[in-house]
Image: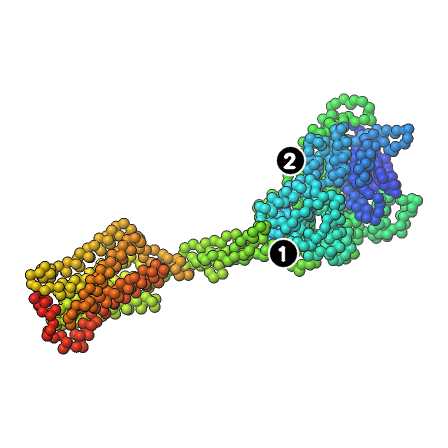
Amino acid sequence: MLEKQNLPQNWTSISKYNSLPLCEWNLAKTHWRLSHVIFAHTTKCLSCKNQLSNGKNYQLVLALVFAIEEINRNPHILPNMSLGFDLYTIPDNESNVLESFFFWLLGLEKVIPNYTCRRESKSVAVLLGATRKTSSQTGLLLELYKFPQITFGPFDHALSDPGQFPSLYQMAPRDTSLALCMVSLLLHFHWTWVGLLISEDQKGIQILSDLKREMEQNGVCAAFVKVIPEDTEFSLHLIIESSANVIIIYSDTNFVEELLFAIGQYFMTWKVWVTNSRWQDVSKMKHLILDSSHGMLMFSHYHGEIPGFTELTSTVNPSKFPEDIYLARLWHFCFGSSYSKRDCQTLENCPQNASWEWVPEYVFDMSLREESYNIYNAVYAVAHTLHEMLLQLVDTPKMGNEEGLLFSPWQLHPILKKLKFENIAGEQVTLDEKMKLETEYVIHSFWNFPEGLSYIVKVGNFSPYAPHGQQLSLQEDLIEWSIGFTQTPRSVCTETCGPGFRKSPQEGKAACCFNCHPCPENEISNETDMDQCVKCPDHQYANTERNQCLQRSVTFLAYQDPLGMALACTAVCLSVLTSAVLGVFVRHQHTPIVKANNRALSYILLISLTFCFLCSLLFIGPPNTATCTLQPIAFGLVFTVAVSTVLAKTVTVILAFKVTAPGRRMRRLLVSGAPNFIIPSCSLIQLTLCGVWLGTSPPFVDSDTHSEHGHIIITCNKGSVTAFYCGLGYLGSLALGTFMVAFLARNLPDTFNEAKFLTFSMLVFCSVWLTFLPVHHSTKGKVMVAVEVFSILASSAGLLGCIFAPKCYVILLKPHSCSLHGNIFHLLCRVYFGNG
C-alpha cells in the first residue's frame, strides 16, 4: 500500500503554487509528490494590457489548484497519496514553446554551460493551454513519448485527428449545434439577411459550412461572406455598405480584438453582432458609452456550477494569501496598492475593504469560465485515471526505485479512452469524442456602460434535445440592443410580403430578395412571406384583401330576384296575351280573315306560342333534376311545332296561289292536306334528337363558382354541348328554311295574304337566335339563364306580334274590311277547303 506523503507546512494554502517571486514571472513551478500535471498557457509581458489577460489566466490557475486540493481532501479518490502539479507559462514565441517543453522533458531547471541538472520526474499527464499553437506544437513533441495530453481550450478539429495526435484528448465539446443555435436565433427575430465574417482557419471553415447549410434549409440568406486570413487587415467598407443589420462573426480572440477596435472607430451602433464566446475576452476593453459592441449577442457552452469555486474567487486577496505575489500585482493594478520593488511580496497602503465586486469582469471574473470548468474536469479525469490504474496495480509487485512511478504515463491511455464519470455538477464527463453528448448553449447579451463598466447578461439558452420549435428559449426583455435601435432590429433584404401577397424572386439575387405580388383571383395568403398563394375551395371565395376565404352564398335565377321576377311576369303576360288572341280567333272563326289563312294552323300556332312563353318558366327558380330534364324537351318541341306551323302556313299560301287549273298537281296537294304533315314530321325529328340527347348525356344540376363573386350559382348543365347545339342548329335550319319560303311568297297579291307577315316574323325569329349564340357563349351563371329566357320570350313575341297583331287589328278595329268582294284567295280556299 502506498503511503500518503506528508506535505510541507508551507503548502497548506492555495497560494503555494506561486512560491517563486512573480517579479520573475517567466516560470512558476512547484510540485507535490507522486503524480504531477503540467499546465501550459500563453502569457506575454506584464504591460497594462496584459494585466487584463493575466486576470483571466489567474482564474485558470485557481481552478487548477481548487480541483487538486478538492481531490486531495477526498478520501475516495487516490487515498493515502496526494496529487500535485508543475505550472509552466509558455511565451507566444514559437521557438520558446518548443524550448520550454524540451527543458521540461529533460527535467531541467535552467540551462548552464557545461552543466546539466536533471531532476526526477513524476509527471503523468499534461494539461495544455487554450491556444491551438501550444497544443499542436507540444502535442507533436509529446507524442514521441506517448505522453497523455489533455487540452482545456476550445475544441479544435485539427487536434482530433487520431492519426496525428493519438495521445491528445480534448475536454471541450464539439460545436456541432452552434450553427443551428445561431440560425434559430436569426429565425426567432426574423433576420433573414445577415453578413458572415469568418476567420480563415479549420474551425472557421467548418462553422462556415455548417452555417451555410442551416441557413439554406431555413430560408436565411448571406448578404456577404468574408473569409479573413490570419494577420490580414480587413476593410470595413463591406460591413458599412451592406444593407444587413446583423453580422455573424466567428474567429479567434486576436482577430476579434483588432476587428472590434476598427469597428469602434466608426461607431457602428446600427449593427447587431452575433458571435461566439471568444469575444468576452476582448469586447470589454472599450471605455466609451457609444460602444459598437453594446447589445452584442454571444454564444457559449452551457456548464454546471462548481460549489465553492465562486466563494474562492470572490474572497481571494493578498491578506489571505500573502505569499502570492502575482495576486499582489493584480491587486495593485485593480485597487492602486503599492508594493516594494525589492520585495515583491510586501504590499503597502492596501485598502482593507476592497472587493473584487468593484472590479469589472474583464479584469477579474469571479464567475466560473468555460475554460476553468474544463480544467476542473481535466484534473478530475487524471485523478480518476490514476485511481483506476493504481487499483489495477495494487497486487503488482513494485519494481525499480521506490521513489519512481509504478507505471509509465503511456499506460494510462486505455483507461483515459474509456473514462466516464459524473462530476460534482451532475454532468457526464468523458474523453471519448464518440461518447460525448451534444452540448447546450447559453446566450448572453453584452451591456457596455461608460468608463469600461460592462455587464454580461444571460438572455436565453439553446438545447438540441428539446422538441423542434422549442429548442431556443429567450428572455427578450433582458436584451439591450445597439444604441442605433429603439426597438427590435430588422435585417431583411426585402420587407415582408404581408397577407394577400406572394413572393416573386428577383432574377440574379438571393432567395431572400424578392418582389411582392398580389394573389390571383380566388387565391389567398394568410401568412407573411408565402411563396405561393392557396386557392380557396369551390364553396368559398377570397375576400378583397386576399387573406381569407369566405363562405359563398348559394344563388340562382329566382323569382324573388328583380330580373327573374321581370322575366316571369313577362312570360305570364305574353302567354295570357296569346290565349286572348286565340280567344279572339275562336270567336271570329267564321270571318274571312280567319278562314282565309287556314284556321286550324292558326290555332296550332297560337297554342304552341302559349307553351313557348310558359316553357321559359322552367328556367326560373331553383334548378332540380326534373326541370333540367324538361328544359331541352319543352323548348325544342314547342318551338319546333311553332316554326313548323309557320312553315306549313307559308307552304299553304304558296300552293294556293300556284293553282291555275283544277286538274293540276297543286290542287291534289291542297285537297289532300299535305302541308299539315309538315308539323308532325318536323316534330318527330326534334323528338328524336332530344331522345338521343337524354339517352347519352342528359342535363344535370351544376354549380357555377366563377360567374359571380362570392356566390355559388346553381344552374342546369347542358350535359352534352354537342347535343344542345345540334338541337338548336336543327331549329335554326328549320327557321331559316321557313324564312326563305316565306320570302318567296312575300309579293303574292291579296288582301288577306299573310306571306309578308310570315316573312317578317321569321326574320325577327332568326335575328333573335343569331344574336343569342355569341351572347350565350360569352355569359355564364344567372346572366346566361336570363339570356336564354329572354331569347325564348323575344322570338315567341316576334312570331305573335308579326303574324297575329295585324289580323287582330283588322278583326277588332276594322271589321268592315273583312269583305269577300275581290278576294280571290278566299274563293280558292272555298273551292279546295270548303268553308274551313
Q: Is residue 538 left or right of residue 153?
A: left
Of badges 1 and 2, nearer the viewer stands: 1
690 in relation to 805, above or below: above
Q: Is residue 225 left or right of residue 75?
A: left
**Residue 463 occupies quadrant:** top right
Residue 568 visible to an observer of this rendering = yes
Q: Secondary structure at mark 2?
A: loop
Q: Which mark is residue 490?
A: 1
Q: Nearer the viewer, residue 45 or 356?
A: 45
Q: Secondary structure at mark 1?
A: loop
Where does the image place residue 248, in percent across and percent down from the top left?
67, 49
Three-letter amino acid code at the position of disc 2: Met
Q: Residue at x 69, y 59 (%)?
A: 484
For the C terminus, the quadrant is bottom left
554 in relation to 400, above or below: below
**Residue 36 occupies quadrant:** top right
Residue 11 visible to an observer of this rendering = no
Q: Which mark is residue 435?
A: 2
Q: Nearer the viewer, residue 746 or 785?
A: 746
Three-letter amino acid code at the position of disc 1: Arg
Q: Residue at x 11, y 61 (%)?
A: 666
How far apart marks 1 and 2 lie (CA) works out to 40 Å
103 in relation to 292, above or below: above
- The crowd level at tag 1 (other Cα within 10 Å; few <14, some 14-19, many 20+) is some
View extreme (right): residue: 342
- The crowd level at tag 2 (other Cα within 10 Å; few <14, some 14-19, many 20+) is few
Q: Is residue 653 left or right of residue 550?
A: left
Where does the image place residue 643, in percent across and percent down from the top left?
21, 62
